[in-house]
Image (tube, coloured by chain):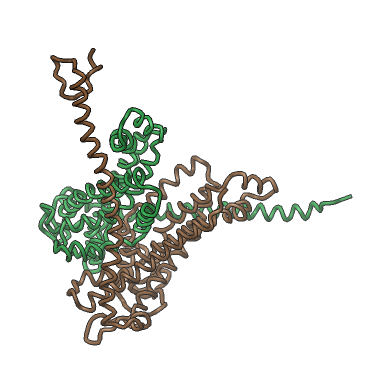
Amino acid sequence: MKYVDTTQVQKKMSSRLLTNRIAKTLFLLATLFGLLVLVVLIYRVFSQSLGWIDFDFLNNRLSTNPERAGIKGAIMGTMWLMLVVAPVTLILGVGTAIYLEEYAKKGRLQAFIQMNISNLAGVPSIVFGILGLTIFVRGLNLGAVVLAGGFTMALLVLPVVVVASQEAIRAVPQFLREASYGMGATKWQTIKNVVLPAAIPGILTGVILALSRAIGETAPLVVIGIPAFIIPLPDGLLDKFTVMPLQIYYWTIDSALVDEYANLAAATIVVLLLVLFIMNSIAVLIRNKFQRRF
Amino acid sequence: MKGVLSLGKDVSRESNTLSVRQMIEQNKRSVSTASILEGLMPKILLTIAIISILTTIGIVLTLLTETVAFFREVSFVEFFTSTILKPLGEHAQFGVLPLLTATIISSAIAMAVAIPIGLMTAVYLSEYASERVRKLLKPMLEILAGIPTIVYGFFAFTFVTPLLTKIIPTLQPTNILSPGIVMGIMIIPMVASLSEDAMSSVPNAMREGALGLGSTKFEVTWKVVVPAAISGIVASFVLGISRAIGETMIVTIASGSNKVFTFDVTQSMQTMTAYIVEVTGGDAPAGSTLYYSLYAVAMTLFVFTLVMNLIAQYISRKFREEY
C-alpha cells in the first residue's frame, strides 16, 4: 500500500531545491554588486587622478590654472578644523557619556538626554550647517572661520563620540569598580583611575571615527558660507579656510566649464580617501590591540 | 620599611617615618580636595551633558523663529500647495512642492536600489556566508559606508550620468535618476548591516526547527528568519529613507537646481537640501523672504527626518519579538 506518491514528492522537491539554489546565487550577486561598485568607484577616481598628484599638487595654493592649482590650503584647513573638532568633541562627548553611564539615575532626565542624542544622530548634516550659520557665523558674528566651522562640525559628530564612549564605559566590568571602592576610593577617583583607563581604547576609536566623519563632511561647511576660492592659508582659529571636500565640490561643479577640474577633483578625492583610510586603520588597530576583554 | 609609610607625597627621604598626627593631617588635606572634586564633578559633567540637549533646542529654536517670520510673509497654504517656486525676481513665489516632490522621488529611487540589494546582502551575510567569507566581506561593505558623500556626488556626476545617457539618450546632464541610484548604493551598507544584526539575533533553535521539518535553506530564511527579524529590518528601511531625505551633496552636484514641479526622472530637479545649499551659497541678505525661506525648507526637512527616525525607533521597540 502506497501512502506517499514519490514522483509527486520528487517533482515538488526538485523545484524547491531549484528555488533554493537560485536564491543563493541571487543573494551572492547582490552582495557582490556593492563590492563591484566600490571597485569601479575607486578605479575611476584613481585613473582620473593619474598624473595629477605630485608634490606640487600638495604644496601649491589654489589657482584658476589647473596646471598650477594645489590643495595646500585645503589640507591646512582640514588640520585647523580638526584642531577645534577633536578637543571639543572629546570633552563634550566623553563628559556626557560619563554622566549618563556613571552618575545619572535611571529616570526622566537620563532618558531625555539619551533620546536627544539618538535623535541628534539622525538629523541631516545640512541642518547642523544652518545651526552653525545662525548661531556661530551670524549670531556670534564670527564669519565663516575655522572656529565657527569647527564648532559646527563638533556638534555634528558629537553623537558618534557619546555613543562609542558610553559603550566603552559600559563594557568596563562592575568588579573593577567594586574593587576600587573597596580600597576606599571615591566615585570620581574610581572613574578617573579605573573606569576611564579601561575604557580609553573604545573611546579613542570612537573619537577617530568621528574625526574621519568630520573630515569627509561637506554640506555643513557649504551652508556656513565658505566661498569657492580662498587663496591665503589659514593661520589661526579666526582665519577663513577651506577643506578638501569643499574643494572637490567646487571643482566637480566647475568641471563642466574646464575639463581638467574633474582631474583635480579626482586627485583631491584620492588624497582625502588616503587620509580617511589611514585614520580608520589606526582606529581598527587601537581596537584590536588595546581593547581588553574582561 | 620603604613603601610602608610612603602614603604622603611630600615625605622627605631623610625622615621615612611619620608621626600619626602628621599622617592624619595629610589624609585630611587629600580627603578635602577629593571631596570637593567629588561634589563638583557630577555638576560639571551634567553641564556638559546638557550642552547636547542645548544643541537640539538650538536647532529647533533657530528653525522655529525664522520659520515663523517666513510665514508672516508667505501664507502657509501657498507654501504647501503652490507648485511654483520662484524665489528671485519681482513676483517671487514660494511653493515647496517642487522641492518636496524632488526629495520624495530621489528617495524613492534610492530605496528601490537599497532595499532589495541591502536586504539580499544581509540575508547572504547572515544565513549563507561562512564565517570566513563574512569576515572578508563585511569590512569591505563598511568601506562603502565610510566613503564621504561628496565622493559619491563626483561619481554620480562624472560616471553614472554618462553611463545612463548611453541607455536613456534623453537624459539631461543633471537629472534626478543618477543621484537617486548612487544614493541607493550609498545606503546599501546601512540597510545590510542593520538588517543583518536583526537576523543574526534570531535564535538558531528556530532555524533548526524549520530545517527539521524539511524546509530548504531558502524557506527557512524567507518564512522563519525574515519574519522573526521583521521589526529590525523595517526599522533599517525607515532609517535608510531618512538618510536619503537628508542627503545633500550627491543631489546638489548631480541633480542641479531646476525648480520645476515634475515627475520626469530624466530632468534636473532641486531637492530641499540642494535648495538650502543654493540659497546659502548665494549669500541671501538676512531678513529677506528668500533668507527666511531657507529656514522654512530646513524646518520641513527636519520634521520629515525626525518623524522617520521616531517611526524607526517605535517600530524596533514595539514590534520586537523577544526570544
Is residue B171 toward the left or the right of residue B223 in the image?
left
Most extreme residue toward the right, as rendered? Answer: A1
The residue depicted at 26 percent of the width and 82 percent of the height is: B73
Most extreme residue toward the front, as rendered? Answer: B21
**Quadrant hosting residue A263:** bottom left
Query: What x and y, as percent, mark residue B99?
Result: 35, 75
The residue depicted at 26 percent of the width and 47 percent of the height is: B43
Q: Chain B is drawn in which colour?
A: brown
Question: Is the residue B189 above or below the residue B21 in the image?
Answer: below
Q: Is residue A274 visible?
A: no
The residue depicted at 23 percent of the width and 66 percent of the height is: A254
Query: What x and y, as percent, mark residue B270?
Result: 33, 73
Query: What x and y, as percent, mark residue A58?
Result: 17, 50
Query: What x and y, as percent, mark residue A286?
Result: 32, 38
The green one among the chains is A
Question: Is the residue A128 above or below the residue A90 in the image?
Answer: below
Is residue A240 toward the left or the right of residue B86 in the image?
left
The residue depicted at 17 percent of the width and 75 percent of the height is: B285
Q: How many marks?
A: 0
Most extreme residue toward the bottom, as rendered? Answer: B91
> The N terminus of chain B is located in which quarter?
top left
Question: Is the residue B267 above or below the residue B35 in the image?
Answer: below
